[in-house]
Amino acid sequence: MDDGVVHQFMARASIVGAGMTKFGVHERPLPDLFADAAFDAFDDSGIEPPEIEALYFGNAMGGMTENDTHLAPTLASHIGCTGVPAQRFEDACATSATAFKHAVEAVESGRHDVVLAGGVERCTPETGLDTGAMTKVFVSAAHRQYEQPAGLTFPGVFALLTKRHMHEYGTTEEHLAEVAVKNHYNGTLNPRAHFGRETSVEKVLDSPIVADPFHLMDCCPFSDGASAVVVASEEAAESFENPVDVAGVGHATDVVPLADKDDLPATQAARDAASQAYEQANTTADAIDFAEIHDCFTGAEVMATEALGLFEDGAGGPAAAAGRTALDGDVPVNPSGGLKAKGHPLGATGTAQLVELTEQLRGEAGDRQLDDPERAVAHNLGGDAATTVVTVMEARR
């Protein structure tokens, strides 16, 4: 069970290889996208496909968008990993982080030594679905009886949470716009980002309203893409170059539907998952050097920085406006550009965050490289913040 002491009794897992595609619009079939990320991870680790002992991957919408409900053997075959367990995970936008958690548990328990974890999704019109149809697919992760019939989509879900945060703490639209500006700047430094252009507070505030208080530029895009990491046991990791240790993984669930949550802007699942991950890692939020956060909307980033303990409740918006979450700030958030600029192919987002953590902790992040980070956290949520996976990773010195 996730009792916060798992690492006192089990060996740590490590990421020994990481890869991902560019996020954006792709015409290639879904198996080819995943193969690109998987083989990047294989090349990075120096491993060959037959050495993989299990495949755990995330895909949230393939049954609806690809008419394919049995993707595990298809992808395993496509990358040369047949004859081993292959399993698809679905947990809305937290899909591949959930797959990763199971990969970590598999190697920590001694069941496997080397596992491939990743995710893939196609969310753009290349699937044959327009924006309206894809929005309907996305909202299938909301409550079926109470929220979907009312026409509540995810911009509306996070707008409700954010408006409550604004009411309680004085967070402003300008604070939210600063998050978008920061993440778009970071995206210009990431060659795999969906959007590689800067913006301004004025442009964000002048863009059309999607769901008050969100303007279009407060919202992440639909994207296609894939990501993958090779996870190794503590013993196996010694034979690889540049392993990065997984210090803790927390996974928590909040109440569904929204109307039943005790405190909307608290995003309680994130707080619970962070507590689990920090306890496993024997660390605190004060020791975190940077974070990759699930900023599906700018308000989601503000609330997550508080839920993770990076800032006090109500301080996330002013911290963003003051530059504290910028690359040269004291708590950089989303150096990759985040979902806002890097993009959001649902099933690939969680492990894409871990690719960024791995590259930053190795010192391999190029123009967006932070100054010698030692410890980082990733926050990947699903649905109306009802599922959250939080991962703490540490560099080897």
Image (tube, rainbow, N blue to C red):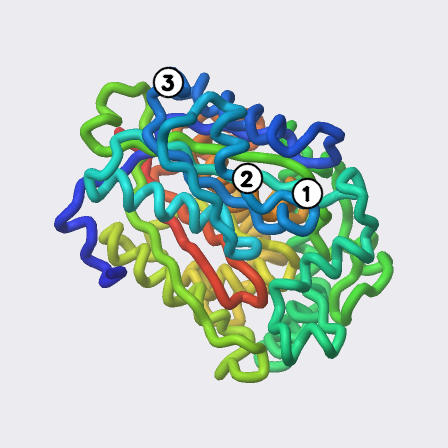
Name the kind of residue labelled 1 in the image. Glu
Please tell me how crowded label 1 is: few (under 14), some (14-19), or many (20+) other residues with Cα within 10 Å.
some
Residue 364 visible: yes
Question: With respect to residue 209, does 289 lie above or below?
Answer: above
Residue sitting nearer the eye, 21 or 194: 21
Residue 47 has which mark?
Answer: 3
Name the kind of residue labelled 2 in the image. Leu
Q: Are marks 2 and 1 in contact (CB under 8 Å)?
A: yes
C-alpha distance separating marks 1 and 3? 30 Å
Looking at the image, which residue is at 72% across and 77% down? Answer: 149
In the structure shown, which secondary structural element does the residue marked by tag 3 occupy?
loop
Q: Which residue is identified by label 2?
A: 71
Image quadrant in which you'd find residue 133: bottom right
Quarter of the image containing the C terminus? top left
Residue 141 falls left or right of residue 202: left
In the structure shown, which secondary structural element does the residue marked by tag 1 occupy?
loop
What is the x, y in percent for residue 342?
A: 64, 40
Give the label, 1 or 3, closer to the camera.
1
Please tell me how crowded label 3 is: few (under 14), some (14-19), or many (20+) other residues with Cα within 10 Å.
some
Residue 66 has which mark?
Answer: 1
What is the x, y in percent for residue 79?
A: 50, 23
Residue sitting nearer the eye, 317 or 267: 267
Looking at the image, which residue is at 79% across and 61% down? Answer: 215
Name the kind of residue labelled 3 in the image. Ile
Looking at the image, which residue is at 73% across and 38% down? Answer: 195
Q: Earlier in the sequence, mark 1 or mark 3?
A: 3
